[in-house]
Amino acid sequence: MALISWLPAGAAGVLGVFFLVRAGSGWTVETMAVAIIGLCGLGSAAAVGICNASGALSRTIDILHRTLDASLEAWLIVAPDGGRFYANDAFVQLFPGGTELPLDRIERTLCPGGNAQEEFRWLRGQAARGEPAAAPLSLRIGHNNRVSRFRITVGPTGEKGQYRCWSFQDLTVHKETEMAIENELNSFCKLLDSMSIGFYSADSDGCFRFANETFARWLGRTPSEITAGEARLHDLVTALSPADNHPLQISATAEVGTCRGEVLLKARHGRVVTARIAQNIAVSARGLCTRSVVCNLTPERAPGVALEASEVFRRCFAEAPVGIAVIDNFGRFEEANRAVGDLLGTTPERLKGQELIALLEEDDRNRIAAKLTALTEGRADREPAEVRPRRSSDKTIVLYLGRLDDGSDAAASAAPRSSARSPGELTAHLIDVTDRKNLETQFAQSQKMQAIGQLAGGVAHDFNNLLTAMIGFCDLLLLRSPPGDPSFADIMQIKQNANRAANLVRQLLAFSRQQTLQPRVLNITDVLYELRHLIERLIGENIKLDVAHGRELWLAKVDQGQLEQVIINLAVNARDAMANGGTLTIHTLNIRQDEELRRGHEVMPPGDYIKVEVSDTGVGIPKENIARIFDPFFSTKELGSGTGLGLSTVYGIVKQTGGFIFVDSKPLHGAIFEIYLPRYRSPDGALVVRGDGSEEAGLKDLTGQGTIMLVEDDDPVRIFGARALRNKGYKVIEAKSGEVALDLIRNAEERIDLMITDVVMPRMDGPHLVREVRETIPDLKVIFISGYTEDAFRQRLDSDSGIDFLPKPFSLKQLAIKVRDVIGIRAP
């Protein structure tokens, strides 16, 4: 220590000798003063002054000595020669005894390892150069070599800075003190967090400085999220009313003091907490801040809020779009919403006390009873079940059953109850899947239609080629065989069976809706009048035919031949169902449908329809067969009695016409088929009240003249066609492929009036051939012949201008009429 600097200036030079005397020399201040007086030969007055100064100096040194000894830090003053000039008690206790130099003694206590030795040598080097320095070092001190961390500071002192002052600050003591303070603060914070009251502090910018756990929990956050500046005071605390300007919002101009008020705390996920805040605004080192206490008012107002929430939930339960119900252990309804009543054909009030299985179809009751039993016995059965309600059997419902005590809190509140629920209550969820089932049925039906269509298309092409040759050559034989010829009957049998085969193909095409219709505007009454005699012959004498025509029946646009086939097929089925006789009734009437009509998976839109109802008094159709009667190849008749295409053909024709067909039947009570055909409207939307009913008169003379190019890759069909046309007076040029025909046309010396070509041929097909030929002869008339349908082949054409179609199989007469019609030569 530079003690000389603390003395009066007059005594400093004199007493400098004192500081050069080492501690422990035995000299006192008084003896030092006498020695100085004697040495200097001072007078008595000077001697007295010196003695007085020495007394004051003695007292000052004593105070400084005691002060340094009382210090917790160790102090050491090192003389220029490296010896100890001064050391306080704390230093002596840390580094006791020993004859070695004090700095060597300190270095011996350094903890081994690390860079402690280098740090201490650096301190000594700095001290030797007279420059201040400091470094933290770990020392082993005391008898038990306890390791303590010290901050060691060194600096020059004394006159001319020849002495070095070392201080040793025990960081371990400071660390323990800091940890004790931190523990106290943590305990206090835990106390605040555990309290049921919220605390927070915010500055004038609204940034939170502190928030306890309770306050943060109310807001759905953590204290660290709040104090991190994610949200400010005005974001989380608002007035009860948006128009209120409550005084709890702190700002830079807020007045110091206390205020109170009720606010809304905006928590996460839209939740709002009503609270009361007592807020004290104070001045801190960083400006204004709040010390706020928050009381949650929600528990006080919970009964009212819960009642309101219960009412909201009850409304949601009652108006839910799916059926929700609570059932007791005996399968009886306790609670049910409106959707359950609608599905089961009653009201929720009337459902209470009724058994669930009693409201279902008989076929479903055993399955559902088993599920209910399993649930009441604690066996889980969560698989849904499809059921049909007894009062609305056309509906399909998926039923989910479960227990309220399965551990689901949400399930426990499935229905609001005024009384406590019993542990064994069950839940039922009912979902109407009628539309979905209808879509599935329609999709399955469309897949069947597609499969049959592919089959029919393939069969039609190849099979109709064979039938065309068979029917055609029969016609050629019949030209040479009069009815009295012995072979006439045999030829007619061959032709009739070929026609039956052709009709089978047409049935396949009708079911798959691929046949080409030729619809005309007709009066259904006229069609039935002409068909009545044929129906009477088909059904026999033991069945009565009753035809009731509707008055002023509307017109429909249908293919007359196909409609007749529909009526005949239904009449034949009715005849087979009335083996012991009965009555077949055909009834027509106008129907104005104001709302859509749903029957099974079929939905008929509103509109005007002509209804044709065909009913019988036969054995009826079993319930299990109703859904399958329109399926292809499905038949209940004995083997060999039918193909199973009759009703499927009826269905295909009606649907292709744009109509609808429904069936209703009960065993032993007959069957009723209802056909709905759309009322015809003209293209401009006007209603047509009278059909033309005209048919082109048949031509008696089928001969003609002209040159015809016949292109057909199937030899029998080409040979028959060529012979038939030559017999009618035409000149025929034959070609077995499109390439041959193209060469013949390009090299022809005479005009070709008509080209008849097959549609499907190898390499160059018919449409391609026509496009090539019309580059040379643009106005060439063309007739396409094909075993495919007209709709199918027209998709392969760029334009249908000037092109006619003759489907296979065709007879000689049909071919001759078509050629006469296209060439334009009429009989005289």
Image (tube, rainbow, N blue to C red):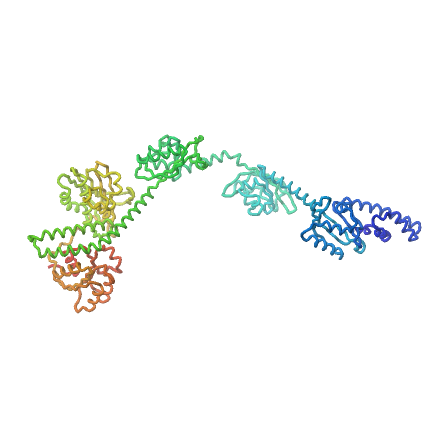
Q: Quadrant of residue 813?
A: bottom left
535 relative to 395 in the view: left or right: left
**Where residue 738 sits: x, y (%)?**
22, 63
The residue furthest left is 484
Residue in front for this viewpoint, 18 or 198: 18
Can the viewer see residue 668? yes
**Looking at the picture, does residue 752 appear above or below residue 545?**
below
Residue shown at 26%/59% (left/top)? 796
Q: How many marks?
A: 0
**Where residue 783 sits: x, y (%)?**
20, 60
**Looking at the picture, does residue 426 appear above or below residue 732?**
above
Residue shown at 11%/53% (left/top)? 491
Residue in front for this viewpoint, 659 or 280: 659
Residue in front for this viewpoint, 735 or 305: 735
**Where residue 724 sits: x, y (%)?**
13, 59
**Where residue 118 sits: x, y (%)?**
70, 54
Can the viewer see residue 550? no
Q: Quadrant of residue 188?
A: top right
Q: Quadrant of the C terminus?
A: bottom left
209 relative to 104 in the view: left or right: left
472 relative to 5 in the view: left or right: left
